[in-house]
Amino acid sequence: ILMVAAGTGLAPFRGFLQERQALAEGETELGEASLFFGCTGRGADFICEDELLAHQTAGVLTELVPAFSREDPKKKVYVQHRLRERSELVSQTVEAGGHIYVCGSTAMGNAVKEAVVGILASGRTLEEARAIVAKLEEERRYVSELWA
């Protein structure tokens, strides 16, 4: 699974990770799970950092990919930028039947969706990529919980 969140959009994914932790403690084999998390800066509002790193150390979270929008005043980095940087992971997740969950502001969610479309457009038309995302949504493999 790919989880994409900014700010308090992290909340449901904490629940996902806690459930995965409980499953792992029961000796359930876990699939890969990556979290793309955006906030202004590591020292400012990287909420639950210790908890997330502990999940990563325990193997509950395969990869934690932070995006800090205000650490470098010359370059804002958002989760959609990190997704593009990890385009191979996004494509592999979709091709392997995985799920993408997005939680946060509507603007962030829209930007993430366009990034996923752009990634999936590699070797396809934009229309084909949009159709793939629409099918993922229909299959509940791309799920967004967004607010203004």
Image (cartoon, rainbow, N blue to C red):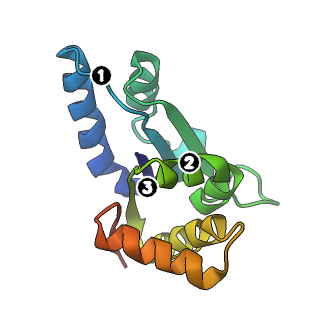
Q: Residues within 10 Å of mark 1 (few under 14, many from 20)?
A: few
- Amino acid type of the residue that numbered disc 3 sits on in the rendered structure: Gly
Of the numbered discs 2 and 1, the one sitting upstream in the chain is 1
Where in the figure is residue 109, as x and y percent of width and height? 46, 71
Helix, strand or loop at label 1? It is loop
Between the C-alphas of marks 2 and 3, the distance is: 26 Å
**Residue nearer the viewer, 131 or 55:** 131
Q: Earlier in the sequence, mark 1 or mark 3?
A: 3
Distance from label 2 to label 1 (Cα)? Answer: 20 Å
* Residues at circles 1 and 3 in contact by the CB criterion of under 8 Å: no
Residue 114 image-quadrant placement: bottom right
Residue under label 2: 92
Which residue is under mark 3? 7
Can residue 116 be seen at all in this image of the molecule? yes
Q: Residue 7 location, x and y as percent?
A: 43, 55
Q: Nearer the viewer, mark 2 or mark 3?
A: 2
The structure residue drawn at horizontal position 46% and vertical position 54%, both measured from the top left corner, is 4
Q: Nearer the viewer, mark 1 or mark 3?
A: 1
> For the point 33% across and 27% down, which residue is it?
30
Mark closer to the chain start, 2 or 3:
3
| Mark 1 → mark 3, Cα distance in angstroms | 29 Å
* Residue placed under numbered mark 1 in the picture: 29
Mark 1 residue type: Glu
Helix, strand or loop under label 2: helix
Q: Amino acid at mark 2?
A: Gln
When asked about the image quadrant of residue 135, the answer is bottom left
